[in-house]
Image (tube, rainbow, N blue to C red):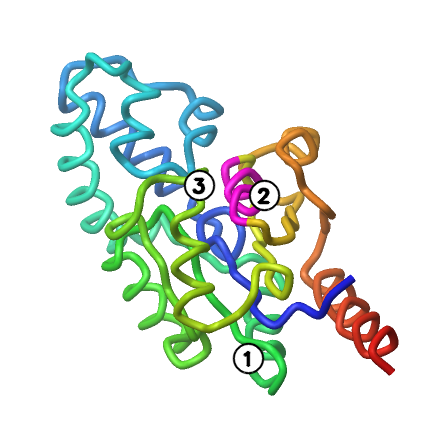
Amino acid sequence: MSATRLVIFDVDGTLVDSQNLIVEAQRRTFVAHGLTPPDRRTSLSVVGLSLDEAFAVLAGPDGPVASLSAYYKGLFHDLRSDPSLTEPLFPGAPEIVAALAARTDTMLGIATGKSRRGVRHLFERTGWAQAFATVQTADDHPSKPAPDMIHAALAETGVAPQDACMIGDTSFDMAMAKAAGVRAIGVSWGYHEPAALRAAGADAIISEFAELDRLLESSILAKQESSS
């Protein structure tokens, strides 16, 4: 197994627990349009897609997708000030980002369905702006599972696909990783079940971030041993 030089993270459901905010924003968006809101499970099933793709699934391709997307985007930003709708980091997220960012042989990236504004908000809250060498968002690329975000991250960092991996919680993340030729590592605490991640091509699934640290270290050691 080759060393992992670029570790790309999804955001919602992987680093950040944003499910309550997402579900409530979707509910209010549908109500404002006179539509029946999706249930919680259905709401979370589209996390990871771009807004237009997500609302095309939730409302149907003939629904008011553009209007729903625009309304949701503004509402989501406003709801962040509601103390009952916090977006906590998942346990171990601050520690794994700090540990990997401190390594000289590893670069970090983000590939997310969030907007650039959403990522800026995350960075302002966490101080992570300097930790990530590349940030790819749905504002600039086709929706997952298209591999464009990973292709851009590899191009920006000069890393070969065999030296990169994608960490995510949805089948869209896993399929994107496989389409881009990088390793796919799923997390068990997100919005899609482990079985769905495996079906989409996950090479490994972790149940806590400490396992990711060990998995990446074993990969690095494997390359060092094979080249010695």
Q: Alpha carbon of mark 2 to alpha carbon of mark 3: how far?
A: 26 Å
- The disc labelled 2 sits on which kind of residue? Lys
Identify the image quadrant of residue 3: bottom right
Q: Is residue 129 above or below residue 23?
A: below
Residue at image position (14%, 37%) is: 70
Residue at image position (56%, 35%) is: 171
Q: Earlier in the sequence, mark 2 or mark 1?
A: 1
Q: Residue 218, image x and y in percent?
A: 81, 68
Residue located beneath label 1 in the image: 101
Q: Earlier in the sequence, mark 1 or mark 3?
A: 3
Residue at image position (70%, 56%) is: 208
Residue located beneath label 2 in the image: 178
Q: Which residues are magenta?
A: 172-180
Task: Using a 10 Å C-alpha cutoff, classify the residue at mark 2 as few (fewer than 14 neighbours), some (14 to 19) or many (20 or more).
Answer: many
Q: Which mark is residue 16?
A: none
Q: Residue 100, image x and y in percent?
A: 60, 76
Task: Using a 10 Å C-alpha cutoff, classify the residue at mark 3 as few (fewer than 14 neighbours), some (14 to 19) or many (20 or more).
Answer: many
**177 in magenta:** yes
Q: Main secondary structure of the magenta part?
A: helix
From the image, state whether disc 2 or disc 1 is nearer to you.
Answer: 2
